[in-house]
Structures are given as C-alpha cells and as structure tokens.
Image (cartoon, rainbow, N blue to C red):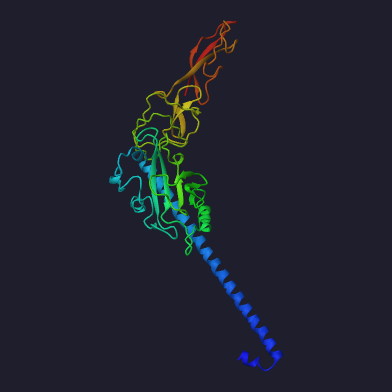
Amino acid sequence: MLAGSCSFAVGRKRQCGIVLLQLVVAVLLAALLAGWGTQTLVNKMNDASAQAHAAWMLSLRKAVLSYVEVHGQALLQAEHEGALSDQGYANWSEPRIAELKAAGLLSPGFPESVRQGGSATVRLLRRGVCPGEDCRLEAFMHSELPFLKKYTGVVDEQMVAQWLMASQGWGGWVDGMRPTVVRGAAFEYPNPPWAGAPLPPGTVVMALGSEYLHQPGFLRVRDTRDPDFQADATVQGTIQTGADLRVQRYLYLNTPAETGEPCEVEGAISREAQAGLLFCQDQLWRSFAGGSARSLGGFSTNQWRGCQNSLGTSTANPVTGSCSCPPFTRPVQISDSGPHDYPEGRTLGFLCVD
C-alpha cells in the first residue's frame, strides 16, 4: 500500500524513501535494545546463580569445620578409609553431603547440588607424620562443574568474580591463565593438591589449611579426649560440675571478702582479707572456723600508756595493728589487772571474736 502510494510522483517517492529509512532505523534500534536488555538479564541471572552457589558452599564449609571438630582425633589417627564407618562415613577423607546431612551437620533440606557449579566434592588431606603429634589436617571443597559460558565453553570469568565476591574471602579458583595452581585470597596450592587429575579451569574451590583445622591444646565442650590433660587451662567464665571438684595441689581464691559483708550465692566460699576462709550463709560472709566464735587476734590497753606495756612494747592486735578488732567482729574482755598506782595503772585484755 505504501509502495503503491509512492509511485504517483517523484516528490512523494522521496518522502516515502525517507519514511522507509526511518522505519528501518527504528527497527534496528529496537532490536539492539532488546538484545542489550536480554544480555543484561542473562548477566544478572548468572550473577545471582554464582552468589547462590557461593552461599551454598559456605554452608558446606561450616559443616566440614564441624566434622573436623567432632572427629578430629579419629581423623588424625585413621589408618584406613573406613575408620569412621561406624559413624556413617564410607571414607573419612571424602565425607559426602548426604553423610553430613545424616549426621546432623547439615540441615535435612540442604540441597545436594545447585546451579551452575552443580554439587561439590569434599576432600581431607593429612600432612606430616600421621598418626603423630606433627600430623595436620587440610580440607578442600570444589565445585563439581567449572563455571563456563553456555555456548562457547570458555571460562565465565564474570560468574567466577561474582562467586569470589560472595565467598567472603574464603574462595579461590583455577584460572585458565595459571591452570597448574588453585589459588584464592588466603591460599595457593598445586592443581590438584592431591594425587589425581587436575581440576579444570573455572572450577571454584574453598580451602581450609592446617591453621584452621589444627587440633587445639585446650579443652573444648564435650571433649572426648583422655582426661589426663597435661597443659594449663584458662577459663574466663564459671566452671560448673555435675559431680565433685577435686584439686590435688592448691586452690587459690584471689578475691577477698570481709566477715559480715553481704554475699549473693548461698554456700559460696571466699578468702578473708586478713586470714582464714569465709562461707556465705543467710546472705552474709561468715567465718569457716568451727563453732560460733573464732579468734581474730587480741589486744590490751593501759589506762596510762594506752596500747603499750610498761616496757614500751606494743600490745596492739597483730591482725589489725592497733588496739582494735577487725571489722564486723567484737572484743570480749578476758583479763583485768585491777587498780594499780601510777605508773602501772589498770590494764584490760581483750579477745576479738566474730
């Protein structure tokens, strides 16, 4: 219709040609914008997929840490791959995701694979003389599939970059420019770190070196090691036992209290500032001495010389350093010399009790 209407006059044909050119340009622009929009959408989907895979791998990393915490000593001493078969692991050095889920180290709903890297393989390696004190563990988790572009099959470096950013610094990969190493921000190993075929370029990896999996020289919750613990242990919180607490040498109480001061925990034991032990009863610190009264020193006073005798020697209480009793105690008179002429005077003796 448009071509027919353009055939009547030369001027009209020129106008028609301009209209056709504009239409072609508009169609081309629309196609380019559509293509750009589609590619942007694809890139965003790939970025989201890479980030989801990194989050999934971080959860797997946490499960591997728990696996080592629970079975650390058995892993260091394992003499064959079935050493943890009674715990549900066919091969101690390659715990499977299904086995970690069955052991409760991953939630039951944890997926065994995600797009685009697929599932993951966990490998544990031992370095040094094993079993032995120099034995060290290292763990690796790598994607089952490399991150490749769909049609060209080359490494999708944009997806790898998104994965690395989402891995919180724990991730690494096999770079096509350096295919002989597996490297990340915090590690670099030969490709592969174990005997076997190398990982293909584009494979993403998380590694836990011996600095993260080293068996500590301190006690931990639910520690199953022999209780013959040889090192010092420092605990910042309260120690509670379900049975007796036995000390073969000394018990040091570093925070002193005073007799008669308020206390909070009934039955608690403390050290007195001057001497002796105290226990908390009826919310007051009381003496640990048998009976209702305990000597806390004594003193004597003279009506003329005060806290001295006729030889000029002090008669002060050795606990307080003066003719007085410690706080929250009371003096009990135990002697009276009776009246004497000057310079002897009258001397009274006292014993301090609580």
Q: Residue 63: image x %, image y %?
A: 40, 49
Please, which residue is most extreme toward the left here?
86
Q: Give the camera-side residue of 196 and 240.
A: 196
Write the residue at 41% across / 55% down. 144
Q: Quadrant of the N terminus?
A: bottom right
Q: Which residue is situated farthest in the bottom direction here? A: 8
Q: Quadrant of residue 73?
A: top left
Foreground residue among 38 and 25: 25
Q: Is residue 225 above or below residue 160?
A: above
Q: Is residue 50 left or right of residue 15?
A: left
Residue 196 location (% of width, % of height): 38, 47
The residue that appears at 52% across and 56% down in the rendered structure is: 157
Quarter of the figure with residue 210: top left
In the picture shown, does residue 266 fall above or below 169?
Answer: above
Residue 247 is left or right of residue 298, and the answer is left
Residue 34 drawn above or below residue 316: below
Where residue 50 appears, as percent x and y from the top left, is 49, 58
Q: Residue 17 appears at what percent x and percent y? A: 66, 85
Total numbered circles: 0
